[in-house]
Image: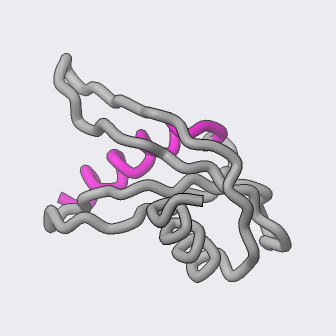
Amino acid sequence: MSPRIEQLKLAVERVCLCKSNHVRSDAVVEYFQGKVVWDGMVETFDLEGHDSAKRCYAFPFADTDGVPTVKIIISVPPVESPHRAVQVAIAERARRK
């Protein structure tokens, strides 16, 4: 496992309070009005023993202050894909502005 994925795995386990297993990496590009608003890799993790979800998505994301952090989005409907997880993170950031 790469150091990047290992760091994300540790963040997932700290936030979700359960064990996790890396499943896959997906390249995601999100556009808004013809412009790229996010472009990067989203890591999918299976969760072992989480109260409400079996999966989550983790990726670096700059929040409203522009500082990159790790964003962890739990896979509960309607979030059922890495692409949708990025859309949710972007929408959350837009609401905070």
Q: Would you identify the image quadrant in which residue 95 lies?
A: bottom left
Which residue is found at the position 35% from the left and 29% from the top?
A: 29
Residue 2 in percent (x, y) is at: 52, 59
Residue 81 in percent (x, y) is at: 61, 37
Which residue is found at the position 66% from the left and 51% from the top?
A: 75
Query: In the rendered picture of this protein, how many numbered marks are placed on residues?
Result: 0
Name the residue at the top extreme.
Answer: 34
59 in the magenta segment:
no
Residue range corresponding to the magenta coloring: 80-97
Query: Is the magenta region chiefly helix, strand or loop?
Result: helix
Residue 55 position (above or below residue 8):
above
From the viewer's perspective, is 19 left or right of 56?
right
Residue 81 position (above or below residue 74):
above
Closest to the observer, 53 or 23: 23
Residue 17 in percent (x, y) is at: 68, 82
82 in the magenta segment:
yes
Which residue is found at the position 82% from the left and 68% from the top?
A: 48
Residue 76 in percent (x, y) is at: 69, 51
Residue 6 position (above or below residue 92):
below
